[in-house]
Image (spheres, rainbow, N blue to C red):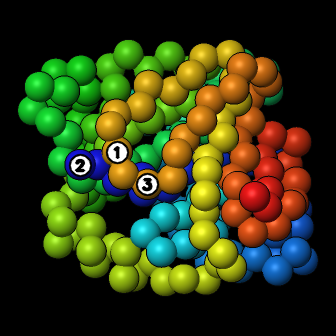
Amino acid sequence: MLALDHVFCFVAAPGRAAARLEAAGWHLDAGQAHRGQGTRNRRLIWPGFCFELLWLEDAEEAAANPLRLDVRAAWATTGASPAGIAFRGRLEPAARAEHWPYDALGPRIWIPRDAPPERPLAFVIEADEEVMALRRRAAGTSQPGDLREVRVSGPTAPALPAYDGPPVVHAPGPHGIELVAGADLEIAPHVWLRAS
């Protein structure tokens, strides 16, 4: 069974988004650059799950990468979804034909072949149970409360595999992502944290 690993959302003003989170009592890690992708992140971490504030750091590098995250980063002008949903575990062999492997970041990541940019990107990080357990222990418990639900809005619903973890719910409308957790806070016009 796959497990929900993280969700991401591109933000145009990462400093402002991070400051709003921290002012509301949320704890962000220092994040990391994704070499070869042209992106950088900062994360809110729960046990076994994290939320990434993601932004474009090198547009040229992103445009040369097969993931083309520059298109998602420019969502306001391209119409692409700024959101992504990552699962961890082993993709069923029958499902692999519908995906292509991306190996640039270390673990193999399975990207759907049919991933139109207007749909949130749903992908699988290949990891066995031992690796998954190590990731859960390393993730820590820096956020108050549990993550209860992920709400993704946009014109097209994400294509989700069967998985274990908080429900991911789609609603038609403008692109956005909402995490139902421990406090109400608008991070950016398309990113919310909301108490349940």
Category of crowding for the residue at label 2, using alpha-carbon neighbours closer than 10 angstroms: few (below 14), some (14–19), many (at least 20): few
Category of crowding for the residue at label 1, using alpha-carbon neighbours closer than 10 angstroms: few (below 14), some (14–19), many (at least 20): some
Residue 134, quarter of picture? bottom left
> Residue 44: x percent and y percent?
63, 69
Residue 129 in sight: yes
Mark found first going from the N terminus, 3 or 2: 2
> Residue 28: x percent and y percent?
68, 75
In the rendered view, tell whether residue 170 sits above or below residue 42: above
Residue 72 in sight: no
Give the residue pinned by disc 1: 163
Q: CA distance from mark 2 to mark 1?
A: 6 Å
Mark found first going from the N terminus, 2 or 1: 2
In the rendered view, tell whether residue 170 sits above or below residue 24: above
Q: CA distance from mark 3 to mark 2?
A: 10 Å
> Residue 155: x percent and y percent?
68, 16
In the rendered view, tell whether residue 89 sits above or below residue 47: above
Q: Tell me the element at label 1.
A: strand
Labels in figure, total: 3
Give the residue pinned by disc 3: 165
20 left or right of 66?
A: right
Residue extending farthest front: 196
Residue 76, quarter of picture? top right
- The answer to whether the residues at label 3 and label 1 have Cβ atoms under 8 Å apart is yes
Q: Which of the two residues, 99 or 40, is positioned nearer the viewer here?
A: 99
